[in-house]
Image (cartoon, grey):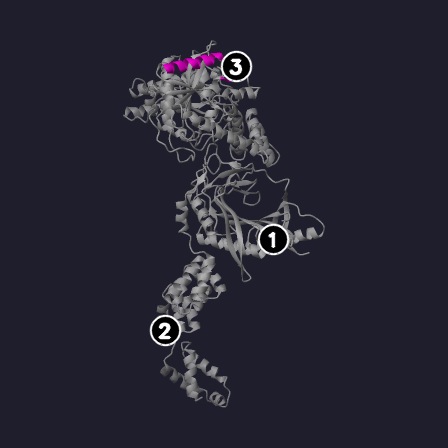
Amino acid sequence: MEYEAVIGLEVHAQLSTRSKIFCACSASFGSPPNENTCPVCTGMPGVLPVLNRRVVEFAVRTALATSCTVQKRSVFARKNYFYPDLPKAYQISQYELPLALAGHIDIELNGGTKRIGITRIHMEEDAGKLVHEGEFAGAQASLADLNRCSVPLMEIVSEPDIRTPEEAGAYLRRLRDILVYLEVCDGNMEEGSFRCDANVSVRPKGQEKFGTKAELKNMNSFRNVEKALEYEIRRQIERIEDGGKVVQETRLWDAAAAVTVSMRGKEEAHDYRYFPDPDLLPLMVEEAWVEELRKTIPELPGEKVARFVKAYGIPRYDAWLLASSRSLADFFEASAAVYGANPKVTANECIHWKDAVAAGRLTPETIAHAVEDRESGAISATVSKTLVELAIETGKPIRRIRDEKGLTQVSDTGALEEIAAKVLAANPKEVESYRNGKAGLLSFFVGQVMKETRGKANPRIVQEVLKKKLGV
Amino acid sequence: MHEWTLLEAAQKVRANEISSRELTRAVLERIERLNPAINAYITVLAEKAMRDAQSCDEALAKGLVRGPLHGVPVGLKDIFCTRGIRTTCGSRILQNFLPPYDAAVTEKIAASGAVLLGKQNMDEFAMGSSTETSCFGPTRNPWAIDRIPGGSSGGTAAAVAAGMCFAGVGTDTGGSIRQPASVCGVVGVKPTYGRVSRYGMIAFASSLDQGGAVARTVPDAAVMLSVIAGHDRRDSTSVDIPVPDYLAATEKSVKGMKVGLPREYFGAGGLDPAVRAAVEKALASLAEQGAEAVEISLPHTEFALSAYYILAPAEASSNLARYDGVRYGYRAETDGGLIEMMSKTRAQGFGAEVKRRIMIGTYALSAGYYEAYYGKAQKVRTLIRRDFESAFSKVDAILTPTAPTPAFRLGEKLADPLTMYLSDIFTIPCNLAGIPGISVPCGISPDGLPIGAQILGNHFREETLFTAAAAIERAIPLPRVAPL
């Protein structure tokens, strides 16, 4: 029997606000343990949360960028459970009434486009972190680091529209690109600022009813998400084919062993006793503010790719490579604005030098002038590469380096004729062979001329001059 | 000296008739003498109070008056966090807890120039109507030492009634300021929800908790409330509405004021005849001064207690979950793991009443029961709020008894929670609706016990309460300090 998988993803994105969601503590990563804490985020008796407006702004912008409907009224709720990294013994989240509903993201796969629905987007606070014995020098017991407590998170829940691990990967990459474009999340999966849980089930192809799902956790890279889904889908199909049943449970991905293992079953599922947090009033989002924020949404990756293909005539694949980073795409456009005669070459150059672009060590003029000089024949491809490297190293304008080093290509036929005559005079045997029909020797003469000019000669003109002199 | 009103004491200090040190020393001596019997204070800050009094005297010598309560000693219920000063909430689980910060109310009291005498006894986590659930032992009623002082702010009411402070700040979730004020013969005011910042006030039931003043006279209560009221950005439920001149309101006439008498409150079984008679006398005094009595109905009153005992425990079960022994407070000794440490800590750290309410609240919020309990109780709450909205379209204030009986005996109701809960039957609807309420002494029972009348007003109409309560106070003169 043929099976298909049904996958829904829950993404937790850490919002890159300066302060936490309910207090003024810094939300930065990597501070010494418990440095970014105060009575509020450590859950002292009597403290109260105050919502960070910036967090709402970031979440609303994400909702707009994923075509969700922003709710005028949403409610923060308490999710109650005991754990030493959760100082209040409840997490403030949104439950019945989230900030945004019913959006979508379009993904591209195998030349086609597929729309993945987004069920909801809500805001919540993160928990702290436990450091266990042996994990850090001198630790004799488990210790709690509460720096991460109340760092703002946004949960983005997809519809169960995803059918394959590849689609899941494409969805996650697209979602991350959007968040990074919006500058609301740094998208770093290893540091945990972009985390993903997956709900996955299988069913015979053609059947409408969903199978029993498992929830997968602990996947800390896109590749791991894909691998875990591949494994889990295979495991569920095998279970059914062996006459067994899939049980509803939470499973952890063990990346080292490349398997998923059961963490807890349905019976052990927590009853979180959600209820509206009486310390926070319902969140009212004014329509005028939403409209104001709508104006701050930049062109998103998908739109950018479409425009690049149309406006610059560059291949779709290259457009995606450029659009994968907002700064690289902007850099490309700035270069093409300086010299726009051959955007394809400009695009290639930008992609080739993307690391230097990201590091801020190249100006759009450098790439534009390099391409322009090459196109005009003023420099060769080899020299172009050398010049860009020198520009990265010294930070000087590329044309000044070119002139200082005397690396302009020699296209002056008079000068080249002299050198060509010298080369031919020095190689009488080869000249004879050539005249007797050994045409391949032309490149030998070209190489000799190039050598004499230390690479500065324009190869096209050298050929012309040589052919004329050899009388062919 | 201890019989002076708060206003008199403040005026005398400012006029250099007495130093803050003399005044503070006198009250501290009274505390030293009476507290062993009354147990109104959990913590007495004798040295700190004397230091602060000296600093007030020095400031005054330079012509500096810090605020309206400059140099006057007052007390705080032990539910308000005080930086570096033990704050217990009457619980073993916070027996040695030193808060790293001050509550908004603590800051405001300091800014008023008052001298803090100490932290006053209370029912554990404010859960109780008799101050018997405190892990520091019960507080006794200064009017009759074998009787309860009411609760949960029983320590504050007893201290005010015994002259062990000039005024205090308590909290009121279902009557915890008004009921003790009533049975201790003092004035207690719970303002509109959102008037006094809850920041640093240890939470019992967040949507109902509200700080308020306890004092010996209505003008004193008015001054005390104006000190602690006001918007605070650290409390998202705090309301940004200017605080009016409450003291001026105590001098206004009740002429033309429409006073509603809810028939459901006076028809209730269990209403002591002496209480009924005293409240009727209060009504008569208002009528004599030109107020008009109007019979009204608050039809959903009978459901208030049940709704309250779902909502308050539900919120409490979540608010009190943080006391797990991990970061602060009591931690049980155990060789077991994390779960055992947490459950033993809570089993040993909380008293019976607190555990009962955590159990009720946890149950009410559980999957499958939420709608039937919490959801339904919220609906009842809405109906009760509407009852009051409709009443206040007809009347300016509502007059009721504060408590159905005068102070009962220690231990009398401790074993029977349901009977105990009925002590708050007249005060709870006010918290559910979020409206302000005041209790003012209006008589003495044949047993010689004080009786209070409750006046309720519309949202942010505390001034109406002060006007009406002051009129009753002027008409029915009663001893301000318990005859100890």
* Disc nearest the viewer among 3 and 2: 3
Chain under disc 2:
A
Residue B279 magenta-highlighted:
yes
Mark 3 vs mark 1: same chain? no
| Kind of residue at badge 2 | Gly
For label 1, the crowd category at 10 Å Cα-Cα, with few meaning under 14, some 14 to 19 and many 20 or more, is many
B125 lies left or right of A334: right
Q: Which residue is mark 3?
A: B409
For label 2, the crowd category at 10 Å Cα-Cα, with few meaning under 14, some 14 to 19 and many 20 or more, is few
Residue A95 magenta-highlighted:
no
Which sits earlier in the primary sequence, circle 1 or circle 2?
A: 1
Q: Quadrant of the N terminus of chain B?
A: top left
Estimate the spatial distance between the alpha carbons at disc 3 and disc 2, rounded to whole Å.
106 Å
Is mark 3 in CB contact (under 8 Å) with mark 2?
no
Q: Secondary structure at mark 1?
A: helix
Chain under disc 3:
B
| Kind of residue at badge 3 | Arg
Quadrant of the image occupied by residue B64: top left
Residue numbers of the magenta segment: B267-287
Q: Which residue is mark 2?
A: A406
Q: Quadrant of the C terminus of chain B?
A: top left
